[in-house]
Image: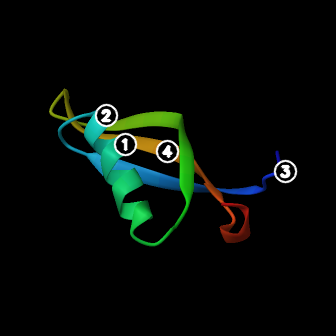
Amino acid sequence: MPNHVAKVIEVVGTSDSGLEDAITGAVERTAETVQHMRWFEVTEIRGHLKGGKVDRYQVMLKIGFALSEDE
């Protein structure tokens, strides 16, 4: 098996409907410009409060992708 090399970037996703939507939105938007994505890791979860209630969710993700010659 050959050695593989990956690059890792950080992105932030936001949603007013939940954590899963924030994650999915961040991954799908990143996929528009980054090829060969392989994995993600949620590294931070935050939110915004308004009137004593959750207004929106925010997640920071690390996304790993293979370098093009390592497919």
The span from disc 4 to disc 3 (Cα, nearest Å) is 28 Å
Dot 4 corresponds to which residue?
Answer: 60
Secondary structure of the residue carrying tag 4 is: strand
**Cα distance, mark 1 to mark 2?**
6 Å
Instruction: Check disc 3 and report the residue beneath it.
Output: 3
In-front residue for pair 37/29: 37
First in sequence, mark 4 or 3: give its number.
3
Does residue 62 appear in the picture of this structure?
no
Secondary structure of the residue carrying numbered label 3: loop
**Amino acid residing under circle 3:** Asn
- The residues tagged by marks 1 and 4 sit, at their Cα atoms, a distance apart of 8 Å
Q: Quadrant of the N terminus?
A: top right
Q: Residue at x 26, y 41 (%)?
A: 21
Q: CA distance from mark 3 to mark 2?
A: 34 Å
Query: Relative to 66, does residue 55 appear above or below in the rendering?
Result: above
In contact (CB < 8 Å): disc 1 and disc 2: yes
Q: Amino acid at mark 2?
A: Leu
Q: Please give the residue where the numbered disc 1 appears in the rendered image.
A: 23
- Which residue occupies 53% across, 42% down? 40
Residue that badge 2 annotates: 19
